[in-house]
Amino acid sequence: GQNIDQPTEMTATEGAIVQINCTYQTSGFNGLFWYQQHAGEAPTFLSYNVLDGLEEKGRFSSFLSRSKGYSYLLLKELQMKDSASYLCAVWGGGSYIPTFGRGTSLIVHP
Amino acid sequence: DTGVSQNPRHKITKRGQNVTFRCDPISEHNRLYWYRQTLGQGPEFLTYFQNEAQLEKSRLLSDRFSAERPKGSFSTLEIQRTEQGDSAMYLCASSDTTNEKLFFGSGTQLSVL
């Protein structure tokens, strides 16, 4: 099975940069997802990492180190609308089923 | 492409009643997932279909839960003899074999009184 760990809550200031970490343990890694979920809404896709390194997409970037079982999501130029839960999910071991972490609740304040 | 559609959006029921939820995935998506999510937690896997075949089912899933995808298109999730602990958001997601990204529906919020 998979075990995923991410911080429960983080706070940051509008305009700043924040890094949300995710560590995982899995047998047979296939890929790692990051999703954003606003309260009461469905998760929406942010990024998918398969290979080591940093992938940048606008204000959001995601990093993966497979040897360390570690990923982070980097959010730049924070906006109030970025206040949401950020979910890390991993799939592997021949399964097509992503396993989600409990999510990190990000609060952006003025 | 109208996205993943779930009905109803909200369901309030009394303990012991049966409930059924429907999910219409994105057309041409052959993979369909059901997850359950409670406040402050991430989505918890329930079951997975590839086309009409139910390929995986969580070991945590009670036998009161059953899901179908009869023609490989829409899916239904039924909960029999509901319990208060079943109160949660039930999320459906779909994907295809060329793109690992899961697209989620807006969910069905179940409240068992």
Image (cartoon, grey):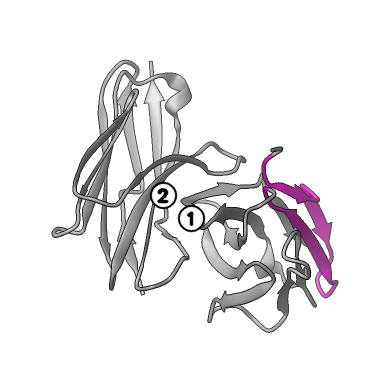
User: Which residue ends up furthest to the bottom in the rendered image?
Assistant: B63
Q: Secondary structure at mark 2?
A: loop
Q: Chain of mark 1?
A: B
Q: Quadrant of residue A28?
A: bottom left
Position in image of residue A70 (x %, y %): 21, 53
Q: In the rendered structure, does residue A49 fall within the stretch colored magenta?
A: no
Element assignment for label 1: loop
On screen, residue B36 versus residue A37, left or right, reads right
Callout 2: few (<14), some (14-19), or many (20+) C-alpha neighbours within 10 Å?
many
Query: Does B13 lie within the magenta span?
Result: yes
Name the mark on residue A103: 2
Question: Does residue A64 appear left or right of residue A105 in this picture?
Answer: left
Q: Where does residue B84 sit, x and y in percent of width and height?
A: 71, 68
* Disc 1 to disc 2: CB gap under 8 Å: yes
What residue appears at the point 57 percent right and 57 percent down from the top-left corner?
Answer: B37
| Residue B43 percent across, percent down from the top left | 52, 57
Residue type at mark 2 is Gly
Q: Which quadrant does the N terminus of chain B fall into?
A: top right
Start-end of magenta stretch: B3-26
User: Residue A86 occupies which quadrant of the picture?
Assistant: top left
Q: Quadrant of residue A66?
A: bottom left
Residue, disc 1: B41
What's under tag 1, amino acid-wise?
Gln
